[in-house]
Image (cartoon, grey):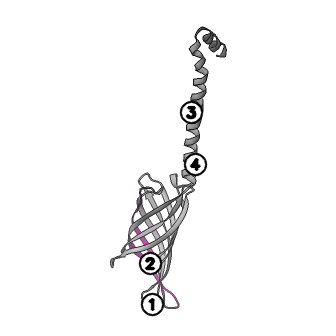
Amino acid sequence: LRSLLSLRRASNPQTNLIPLIMKLLTLTLSLVLAVAVGVSSVSAQDAVEIDGGNALIQKVASTTELPNGNVLLSVKSNGFTWTNAEAPIGNGSITCSGSTVMSAEGEQLSGAGSCRVLDAEGDTWTIWWSGTTSGDWALTGGTGKYAGASGGGTWANTVAYADNKQMNSWMGSITMGM
């Protein structure tokens, strides 16, 4: 190939630009690839601030009276989630399981559980939560695009209805996995 280029250079002075153009194209392509790889690794490693919420319908699965007069409620919930447009975690259907300790007078004393969200593409992300009417949450794993993701934040009950329906808001940050 070099011998052909040298023959062409001898016959046409404009062909001296070919190696320069080839070097510029190679350099440009290298820069584009470096930027693309850099952007994808930055987006996978940088924490993204998120906010969102969920709407749930709760069903009491079981009640257990504790020796001190308190009651342990096991609860299952179903509903949906939503997030801000920049969030790397998607909207979806949510299924939660948890337990709440209630005083004999009906006051929530503590609570904890987990939720799994299924997005439109079939990928899932899972969180644990703790608290009664507000508390903390953490992303504990996922499948597909959520594999290796981590993060967490706080949540608060924004609306509680008498018929076991509720809405929660939450905020925090998420770091997507590789």
Query: Which element carries disc 4, helix, strand or loop?
Result: helix
Image coordinates of residue 63 in percent, x first then y, are: 45, 81
Instruction: Check disc 3 and report the residue beneath it.
Output: 28
Residue 1 versus residue 25: which sits nearer the camera?
Answer: 25
**Residue displayed at 44% across by 58% down:** 118
Q: CA distance from mark 2 to mark 3?
A: 55 Å
Q: Which residues are magenta?
A: 57-85
Q: Is residue 24 above or below residue 97?
A: above
Q: Quadrant of residue 90?
A: bottom left
Q: Is residue 45 above or below residue 80?
A: above
Image coordinates of residue 136 in percent, x first then y, are: 51, 72
Q: Main secondary structure of the magenta part?
A: strand
Q: Hey, what amino acid is under mark 1?
A: Ala
Mark 2 or mark 3: name the one nearer the start of the chain. 3
Q: CA distance from mark 1 to mark 2?
A: 18 Å
**Residue displayed at 55% across by 37% down:** 32
